Amino acid sequence: MVLYLDTAAKQIRAEQILTFTNPSADTIWTMPFHMYYNAFKNNKSTFMTGAGRIPRNKPIDDVLACDWGWIELNSVRDAKGNELDVVYIQPDDDNTNDHSVAQVQLKTPVLPYQKYVLQMKWQSKIPKLMIRTGYSKNFYFMAQWYPKLGVYEPAGTRFATKGQWNCHQYHSATEYYGEFGVYKITMHVPKTYQVGASGFLLNRVNEGDMVAHTYLAEDVIDFTWTACPDFIELVETWHNIELKLLIMPEHVCNKERFLQATKNTLQFYENYLEPYPYPSLTIVSPPYYGLMAGAMEYPTLITAPTLCALPKGIKTTETLTIHELTHQYFMQMLATNEQEEPWMDEGFTAFFEAKILDRYYPEGTISWPYMGLRIGSEELRRGRFLNADNIKVNPMSDFGWHFKHGSYSEIVYGKGAVFLRTLEGLVGEKTMQKIMQTYFKRWKFKHPGRQNFIDVVNEIVPKEHGNGFGKDVNRLLEQAILGTETCDYAVHAIETHQVPNKLGFFESTNNCKSDTTKSEIYHSKVIVFRLGELVVPQEVLITFDNGQTKLEKWDGKARSTEFVYNEPQRVISAHLDPMQKISLDTNLINNSYAVHPNKVGIWRYVSAFVMWLQTCMLALSTLV
Ligand SMILES: [Zn+2]
């Protein structure tokens, strides 16, 4: 593709040659394209009117000045030079005001496994930066900005029972889905601008007032770029990867925080899954007037806002860098469908974000040593989940735009992460790593769906644990992924009394036992309830008054169970899930019960709980 950026008119003119390889035995007659700048074309687009967590307001001055963003195909030709018809389609909602998907009608079909070439000319008006993409003053952030071909899913891929295009309209609730390809793009940009992009710089040619920057990005699902005259470019090499930080002068103070968090994350994945395979990674820290460009992830390019004024104890810079970089493995290399199964990207990413933060920043995501405050990333995730207005509003497996009544982030990010943490708690860290490695190595570059992950779990867990879990893990997977049931187990009561001696007649009526002193044996009973619908195997730590402990196991299936002891010592406390494996449990306060409550302990619990609720308010960004 060759494009010209007109910074005066805020427009792009471009020509692109697209080569598509049919991955199937099907004969294909149409090709759909994402035309996502048309989400900003009018106030009736699906993006502007649909359910979503993103505020979409347009200043009245822009409305009166007709300052809308759009993209138009001026010409689409096949290899024979035939001009092809293009129509807008609305596969999701029949909203004819929505022009975010254009379908090209072919004159000759794409034959099975064959290549097909289209030559396209197009033009766009860049929207004012409202959400993720556009311009703000002299800062350009170009995401979802070009006609992007949909994904052709052959029969058997994800939910496809027959070969089909997967090309959804632009919904404000969801992110994206794209096919792997090679992008070679030459951007003609005014010479005062610094440019950053997916892939790596092939060459830069001066052309009077303009500079032509040519980038190559291989095996990626999308291409994103940015331009701003004020960027400072800092480059470092780490393990043969070129790390490029594009940062505003007022944020340079945080450059080490970005670079260290980047190296920690890359090191983590090198050990945990496999090394980052691309030659470059660009980190864009937007100006304060470009904050709406996010915290977002794009192939080999991430954005992470920062603020020098943030105290050291608040790890927002690190959290965002780790989160967006983690997406490279899930959004980009596995390339799950973020529109249809957003939890498979954001839930996995939030799970690993917490893991990496807790490993490299053990002092906590938010720490304030003078007040004894320490909040780990995991607590933030749990807090985010439990803070949902309705944690049953949708199963986390739903399409992104089906979350009509809120709780998208809480379920997709929060429940997704908390569910994976629970799975890890049950099967252990070593088995979890095997699951993740197998899933990643088997499915990278192939767009897995949830069933592919479920199959890997059901394959690896019996290998590692024999039949120890029976069908329990599969039941948990199905309930947690497809259902809306919640998990809550509680220690209901501890009953304990000294066993009386035998009184009355036993062996014969000649020998009455009447010694009313108590025996030295205590009868103790611990009653445990399953209050939620979700079934999770449980452990209960029983503590006796001589300090002895006993770890009991329960399959968690019945609505209640009891543990009974007749011992010289009595039970003084019971603690469900003492190792805190089951993050999905919505109420941790009822997990412990003490006969003589240790008030200090309980208050610590209460304050921890209040802390979650408070920190939920610190939801880092709606865009991550
Ligand atoms: Zn994210």
Image (cartoon, grey):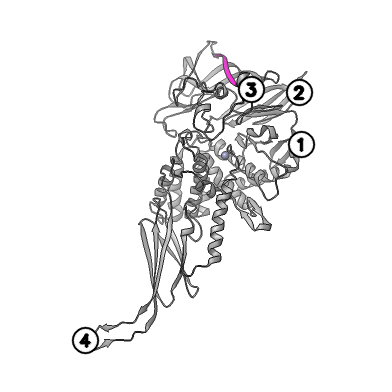
Q: Residue 265 location, x and y as percent?
A: 63, 45
Query: From which residue to which does the magenta span run?
Result: 68-76
Q: Which of the two labelled residues, at mark 2 and mark 4, occupies the earlier sequence position? A: 2
Q: Nearer the viewer, mark 2 or mark 4?
A: 4
Q: Nearer the viewer, residue 262 or 607?
A: 607
> In whole angstroms, how far apart are the C-alphas of marks 2 and 1?
19 Å
- What distance separates the C-alpha of mark 3 from that of mark 2? 31 Å
Which residue is located at x 26 percent, y 83 percent?
A: 504
Q: Amino acid at mark 4?
A: Thr
Q: Which mark is residue 249?
A: 1
Membership of 213 in magenta stretch: no
Cα–Cα gap, marks 4 and 1: 98 Å
> On the image, numbered disc 3 is attached to which residue?
61
Residue 246 x/y as whole percent:
71, 35
Q: Secondary structure at mark 2?
A: loop
Front label number (2 vs 1): 1
Report the disc number at residue 509: 4
Q: Residue 463, relative to residue 148: is it above or below?
A: below
Q: Where's the N terminus, which quadrant? A: top right
What residue do we see at 54% from left, 55% from top? 609
Residue 69 drawn in magenta: yes
Callout 1 amino acid: Pro
